[in-house]
Image (spheres, rainbow, N blue to C red):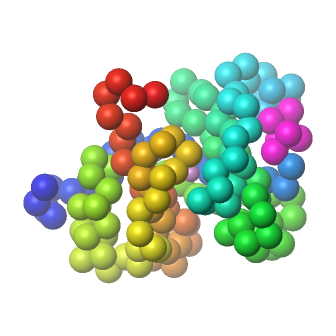
Amino acid sequence: MSADAFSIGPLNHVGIAVPDIDAAIDVYRRVFGCTDITSPKDLAPQGVTFAFVNLPSGQVELIQPLGDSSPIVKFLERNPKGGQHHLCFEVEDIDAACVIMAERGMRVLGAPRIGAHGTLVVFLHPSDAGGVLIELMETPKEGAH
Ligand code: CO
């Protein structure tokens, strides 16, 4: 992939940090009428428990801290009721995206790790993107869930 040709792909999900994922799921189910919500799962490498609210346009990812060193503990200290935490865009090749983002002046936060969809993800510093934490995730390959 040439760097000039790089662009982000579809918006995959909006990440919402919540203090109580069961309570948050209840709001999406009972108040917003969502029927397709995944059961909460632990994702130890990212320090979160997550669930996806599936909508025709994409997903809302609810994340609750898993463990005291969770990266969203501080976010929830500042936003005790929860709040919008990140946007996730798909990219075809996560390693190429990391190189190109760094070339374009973005601070890439660590090496790619397995994310909630089972593909590699990486985060970009919010100060470099209008104050919004950006997650890039490699698009699941055809046939994968
Ligand atoms: Co996410």
Q: Position of residue 1 (x, y in %)?
A: 13, 55
Q: Residue at x 73, y 72 (%)?
A: 69
**Image: magenta residue range:** 21-27
Whether residue 136 is visible: yes
Q: Residue at x 61, y 28 (%)?
A: 54
Relative height, residue 51 to residue 69 (above, below): above
Q: Residue furthest left?
A: 2
Q: Main secondary structure of the magenta part?
A: helix
The residue closer to the viewer here, 101 or 71, is 71
Q: Residue at x 73, y 19 (%)?
A: 35
Query: Is residue 74 toward the left or the right of residue 13 in the image?
Result: right
Q: Residue furthest top?
A: 35
Relative height, residue 5 to residue 99 (above, below): above
Relative height, residue 28 to residue 71 (above, below): above
Query: Is residue 85 toward the left or the right of residue 91 in the image?
Result: right
Q: Quadrant of residue 122?
A: bottom left
Q: Position of residue 59 (x, y in %)?
A: 58, 36
Q: Position of residue 116 (x, y in %)?
A: 56, 45
Q: Residue at x 59, y 59 (%)?
A: 45
